[in-house]
Amino acid sequence: MPPSFADVSDAALVVAVGRYHESALAEVYRRHGGAVYGLARRLVHEPAVAEDIVQEVFLRLWNEPERYDPERGSLRSFLLAQTHGRSVDRLRADHARRGREEREARAAATAGYDLEREVIDYTVGEAVREAVAALPEGERQAIELAYFGGRTYREVATALGEPEGTIKSRIRTGLRRMRGSLSEAGVASGGGE
């Protein structure tokens, strides 16, 4: 049966923690866990983060009990000082992370926002829509299904009930017409058929 540490001083508890008596750590937590959590909660304002800090403080006591010096103050004061330090570290890290994320977001937004590029893309898009709309119906349908619908020549032929060779010819002819229309509109041609 594990020894009872209910009537032992805090200093003796820390010695027992140093000898890996889990029940000694449990008694330290019973005595001081509420105060440690209360301080962490007041400082970081988030229950989950406060719980993490409490765990870090007691884990540190478990791993390094020799850091506590009873001549320098009470165990509660020591644990609260550890809690304060961990809380401030967490707040600083969160503040730095948020600042870094905001700077990265601003940089990405600035780099991603190119009004001139957007105007050009919009203008080209409008010119392409007009060029497609001006095509004869057979060519327009074949191009829309193949290029905007992502279908193969065979799938377009099946959808329109036409031979595959006819569909290929319509697409080639339609693309040639579109290239001419786009050139007349001042939009540079960017590739072959």
Image: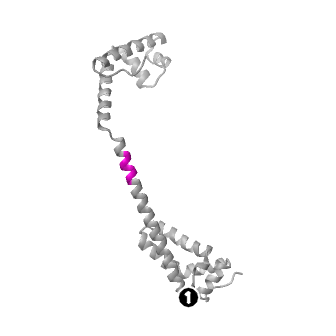
Q: Position of residue 43 (x, y in %)?
A: 42, 72
Task: Please count the marks in the image.
Answer: 1
Dominant secondary structure, magenta: helix
Q: Is residue 106 magenta?
A: yes
Please tell me which residue lies in front, 129 or 60: 60
Tell me how the rendering is colored. one colour
Point out the image quarter for the N terminus: bottom right
Amino acid type at circle 1 is Glu
The residue sitting at 46% across, 15% down in the picture is 157
The residue sitting at 31% across, 22% down in the picture is 187
Quarter assignment of residue 19: bottom right
Q: Where does label 1 land, which residue? A: 71
Q: Which residues are magenta?
A: 102-108
Determine whether the residue tagged by mark 1 lies in a helix, strand or loop: helix
Mark 1: few/some/many CA within 10 Å (<14, 14-19, 20+): few
- Side (left or right) of 110 relative to 56: left
Q: Position of residue 70 (x, y in %)?
A: 57, 86
Please tell me which residue lies in front, 29 or 163: 29
The answer to whether residue 126 is above or below residue 101 is above
Q: Is residue 145 magenta?
A: no
- Side (left or right) of 182 relative to 39: left
Q: Position of residue 162 (x, y in %)?
A: 45, 12
- Side (left or right) of 23 relative to 177: right
The residue sitting at 49% across, 78% down in the picture is 81
Please tell me which residue lies in front, 112 or 19: 112
Point out the image quarter for the C terminus: top left
Quarter assignment of residue 178: top left
The answer to whether residue 73 is above or below residue 132 is below
